Image (spheres, rainbow, N blue to C red):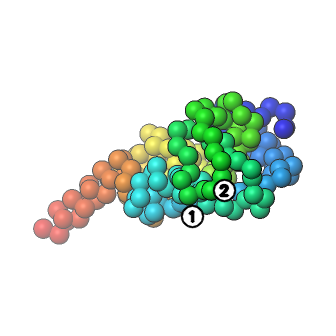
Amino acid sequence: MPAGLRDSKLLRAAERERLAAELRAGAVAWAVASVWPPIIDRMNILQATLLAATVAAGRLPVRPDALVLDGSLALPDVPLPQRVVLDADRLCASVAAASVIAKVERDRLMVELDARYPGYGLAANKGYAAPDHRAALLRLGLSPVHRRSFASCAEIEQLDLWLAEVAES
């Protein structure tokens, strides 16, 4: 394992980038998957997370003997032995590695989306509801990549609908 590998949340972005490149180059197998906002809105964030993990597991070019998962839920549609460990990304190097690769991929996607939907600060806040991002939502409305089921976005959408009704009357 590369030097300095640990839970991705404890690493600076540049360190995650370095580690992710080393991990991808030296790993036997790795895969990522994303679930887009309309699907998340339809199925909820938990089910969408399980779906993405299931798809990523299915994309692995080498079938693993077992999966170690961070959190509290196994993947019901993956026919492999599984061990679910709370804080596994702090306790297990392979889970920390997966966490680093996933976070770097998420950050890359957010930078790409920031270029496509400027003004929201997606590259800077990586999709979290930072104050600047919330202000941009009020100023610009929702983009196609905002989750309508997320409380802040649902409030903005309701406000936009109300303003449209007021403007029509």
- Image quarter in which the C terminus is found: bottom left
Between 50 and 157, the one lying in front of the other is 50
* Above or below 46: residue 33: below
Q: Residues within 10 Å of mark 2 (few under 14, many from 20)?
A: many
> In the rendered structure, which disc, 1 or 2, sits on the residue that comes first in sequence?
2
Secondary structure beneath dot 2 equals helix
* Above or below 29: residue 134: above
Q: Residue furthest right?
A: 26
Between 6 and 129, the one lying in front of the other is 6
**Residue type marked 2:** Ala
Viewer-side label of 1, 2? 2
Q: Residue at 66% across / 61% down in the picture?
A: 58
* Above or below 143: residue 123: above
Question: Residue 28, position in %: x, y?
Answer: 83, 52
Q: Residue at 75% across / 52% down in the picture?
A: 64
Q: Residues within 10 Å of mark 1 (few under 14, many from 20)?
A: few
Task: Check disc 1 and report the residue beneath it.
Answer: 116
- Left or right of 62 on screen, residue 9: left
Between 75 and 151, the one lying in front of the other is 75
**Residue type marked 1:** Arg
